[in-house]
Image (cartoon, helix red, strand yellow):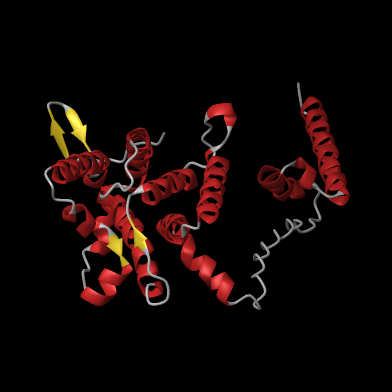
Amino acid sequence: MILFRKDDDYEPVAWVRGIPIHVTTLLVILHVLMLIGLSFAGMMGHPALRAALVFDSGKVLEHGELWRLASYPLVQVPFNPLFFALEMLFLYLFGREVERYIGRRRFVSLYLLLVLVPTLLLTPLGWLYPTALAGSHEIHFAIFITFAVLYPGVEFFLRIQARWLAWGFLGIFALYYLSVGDVPRLCAIGADSLGAWLFVQWMRGDLRGWFTSFSRPWEPAARPPIPPRRPPAATPPMETDPVAAIDPLLDKIAEHGLESLTPQEVARLEEARIALLERSRAAGKSLSANGP
């Protein structure tokens, strides 16, 4: 979709038998391994490990278990095999394009931002309304939001552009969370979507100008500078001899074109032509009169 920039930040993290390994690939592998590991831990009679990774505002505020702020995406509760497979596929497809566009360092920063923003928002609310969160659905949907902001005109099925598909899915998820009363996930998907949009605007350098125009709405917009008018071509001075006026007129024609001559200058040019013809005729007559 874009031209690759020859920079280390836009290259794979590693190569395995000729296969490039990017940050997005490592994230997919991490989620799959955590799912397998937690499943075996639950089967072996250790369900507390899964519970220790889920975000719980009460545990964070009362017991200081800060790792829960970032560990909740690794826990798929409840687990749906088909939905998990589709989520990993979408993460790989759209996350790879986003990483290719912004580079792996910014992609890692974006992913960490999307992980921490919901929990940092829900933790203070825990004093009034205890909240819990698990799973990476909202984070990976925000990755798709980032893709839609970077490539808004990409068309999917039924020729629907990415920007409208993102708005449609965001509305569907918001209505669903409202209908089931899942306030934490509603806050998470809203915060992550807004965070993804703001990250792209910051990366493009548009965020500072947007905040400046928002903070000073009373200042009129600066008018574009008026380009200076080109001064008219100077008229060559009058010469007493019509023939002597040819050189300035020819210089003006060479610099500004024949249409730059005024009617008076055209008349002077015609007078010089007639004077030259008369001089050539007089010179011919004198040569014939002085001949043998």
User: 177 and 231: which one is in front?
Assistant: 177
The structure residue drawn at horizontal position 42% and vertical position 55%, both measured from the top left corner, is 196
- Position of the N terminus, as image quadrant, is top left
Check the image and report above or below for 237 versus 273.
Answer: below
Percent coordinates x, y for residue 119 in the rendering = 34, 64
Residue at the image position 31 percent from the left and 50 percent from the top: 107
The image position of residue 35, as x and y in percent, is 22, 42
For the C terminus, the image quarter is top right
Left or right side of 26 for 169 = right
The residue positioned 73% from the left and 56% from the top of the image is 233
Q: In this orientation, which residue lies closer to the viewer: 154 or 122?
A: 122
- Tell whether 250 sits left or right of 192: right
Between residues 196 and 141, which one lies in front from this camera angle? 141
Residue 202, placed above or below residue 290: below
Q: Residue furthest top?
A: 292
The quarter of the picture where residue 157 lies is: top right
Q: Position of residue 143 (x, y in %)?
A: 39, 47
For residue 15, what is the image quadrant?
A: top left
Residue at 74% across, 45% down: 246
Q: Nearer the viewer, residue 140 or 202?
A: 140
> How many numbered badges does the structure rendering display?
0
Report x, y in % for residue 123: 35, 70
Apparent side of residue 250 relative to residue 1 in the rendered image (left or right): right
Q: Is residue 92 left or right of residue 51?
A: right
